[in-house]
Image (tube, rainbow, N blue to C red):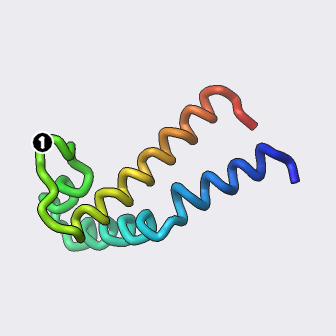
Amino acid sequence: MHIQKSNLEDMISFYFRGERVVAALGRIEELIRLEEKDEVATLLGNHRLHSIKSNTERYFRAGMDDFLLGCDVLEIASCSNWT
């Protein structure tokens, strides 16, 4: 298998298919559907400005962090013409 294809598959598996990521994306989709704007803002918000009070919130916010980090990595790869 080509090394870059293997690396991409590993990255997608970690950043976009991980249990926390899937749970967080499901949660944010539900919050958007229910129009819970404050909850969406909390999930996507700056952790330093809003402290995390529950284990459930920690779990979902960690999943969002993983997802957003994966988006950053893909953007960097795209900008550098990584193929």
Determine whether 29 is above or below 45 in the image: below
Extreme top residue here? Answer: 80
Q: In the image, is 38 to the left or to the right of 69? A: left
Residue 39 placed where, x, y %? Answer: 16, 62
| Quarter of the image with the C terminus in it | top right
Q: In the image, is 1 to the left or to the right of 32? A: right
CA neighbours of label 1 inside 10 A, class few (<14), some (14 to 19), many (20+): few
Residue 31 placed where, x, y %? Answer: 24, 69
Residue 62 placed where, x, y %? Answer: 34, 57
Q: Residue at x 86, y 48 (%)?
A: 2
Determine whether 1 is above or below 69 in the image: below
Q: Residue at x 49, y 45 (%)?
A: 71
Question: Residue at label 1?
Answer: 49
| Quarter of the image with the N terminus in it | bottom right
Determine whether 28 is above or below 80 in the image: below
Report the amino acid beneath label 1.
Leu
Residue 47 placed where, x, y %? Answer: 20, 46
Say how many tags the image has. 1
Determine whether 76 is above or below 27 in the image: above
Tell me the SS state at disc 1: loop
Q: Residue at x 36, y 66 (%)?
A: 24
Between 16 and 81, the one lying in front of the other is: 16
Quadrant of residue 23 in the image?
Answer: bottom left
Q: Residue at x 61, y 52 (%)?
A: 11
Between 9 and 26, the one lying in front of the other is: 9
Between 3 and 77, the one lying in front of the other is: 3
Quadrant of residue 28 in the image?
Answer: bottom left
Q: In the image, is 27 to the left or to the right of 77? A: left
